[in-house]
Amino acid sequence: MSRKPARRPTVKPRRRAQTRKKKQPGFLDRTIAALPISQAALHRLTVWSITGIAIASALTVATIFGVPGVIGSAVAEGIGRAGFRVEQVEVTGIKRADKMTVYNYTLDQQSRAMPLVDLEDVRAKLMTIGWVADARVSRRLPDTLVVHIVERKAAAVWQHQGQLMLIDGEGVLLEPVSADAMPDLPLVIGDGAYAQQPAYQRLLDAAPALRPLVKAATWIGNRRWDLSFNTGERLALPEGETAAAKALTKFAEMDGADRLLGRGYIRFDMRDPARLVVRMPGQVVQKPIEITTKTASVED
C-alpha cells in the first residue's frame, strides 16, 4: 500500500495593517478652539444665548396676545430678575420738549420687568406732552427702552389777556413764551383764536402774496378776522370762511394793481362784500375802487 505524501500546512499571507486616517477638525471646531475663552465659559455663553432667544420669543408672543394670558406676571418678574429689566431709556428726536418729562413718563411703570412694560401706555403718556406730535416706543433687550419723538412745529404765537403762547398749525398749545424771547412768527389775538389756527392758515393760503405782509390777526367776537399788516394798516374781513377768503383774494388783486398798502391808509373794511371802505387820518378822500359793480367809499 502506497503512502500519500504529507500535506504541507497552508500559511495565509499576512495582511498589511491598515492605518486609519485621522479625522481632521472641521472649520467650526477650529474656530471654537481659537476663541480665547474656556470650554466652561463657552458652555455658559451658549446656555445664556438659548435662554435669551427663548425670552425674546416669549416677549414677542406676550406683546401680541398680552402678558397675563401668556406667561403670567410671576414668570415675567422672574424674567426681569434674570437681567431683562428696564435699566436705560434712549431718547431721540427731542429739540423743544422737556427731556426729563419724557424720561419720567417712560419709567412710570408698576414693574420694570421687560415683559410687563406696557408700550402703548407709555406712548399714550408721551402724547400728552404739548410738543409731541408722535411717539414710538420699543424694547431693546436686555435692558433698554427706545423712545423716538416726532415734535410739532411752532406756527404762530397766541396772545390772550397779556399772555403769549406758542401754537402749531393745528392750534395745539405748545408752551408759554416771553415777549423778550418772542420768535419771528405771526401773532393771533383774541379769545379762542388758537383754535381757529387751521382756518386762519387756509385764509392766508387764499392770498399767498399777502402772507409775508401780515403781522397779526385778531379774532373778533368769535366770528371773523381783522388782519394787521406790517405797513401799519388794518383790514376787516367778513364773517364766514368762504366769504373771508374771497374778500382777501380780491384785496390782494387790488393791492397788486393799485398798491393799497404802504400809502398812509389806516383801515380797510371789506365786511360788506359789495364795497371797500378806506379810512385815512383827519380827512375824507374819495377813491373809487371797484369790487363788483359799486364804487368804494373813503371815510375818515
Image (cartoon, helix red, strand yellow):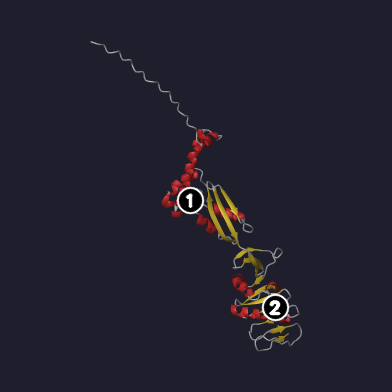
Q: Residue furthest left?
A: 1
Q: Quadrant of the C terminus?
A: bottom right
Within-10-Å neighbours for mark 2: few <14, some 14–19, many 20+:
many
Please state which of residues 272 and 202 is positioned toward the viewer in this rendering. Answer: 202
- Per the rendering, the mark at residue 152 is none
Whether residue 135 is visible to the viewer of this picture, yes or no, is: yes
Residue under the image location 71 percent in, 81 percent down = 257
Q: Is residue 284 above or below residue 197?
A: below
Q: Quadrant of the N terminus?
A: top left
Mark 2: amino acid: Arg
Residue 232 drawn at (x, y percent): 73, 76
The residue that label 2 is drawn on is 234
Residue 95 drawn at (x, y percent): 64, 57
Q: Residue furthest bottom?
A: 294
- Residue 16 occupies which quadrant of the picture? top left
The residue that label 1 is drawn on is 116
Residue 237 drawn at (x, y percent): 64, 79
Q: CA distance from mark 2 to mark 1?
A: 59 Å
Residue 182 located left or right of residue 93: right
Whether residue 191 is visible to the viewer of this picture, yes or no, is: no
Please state which of residues 141 and 174 is positioned toward the viewer in this rendering. Answer: 141
Element under label 1?
A: helix
- Residue 129 occupies which quadrant of the picture? bottom right
Mark 1: amino acid: Leu
Residue under the image location 72 percent in, 86 percent down = 298
Q: Residue furthest top?
A: 1
Residue 235 located left or right of residue 79: right
Element under label 2?
A: strand
Residue 186 drawn at (x, y percent): 67, 70
Sequence-earlier tag: 2 or 1: 1
Within-10-Å neighbours for mark 1: few <14, some 14–19, many 20+:
many
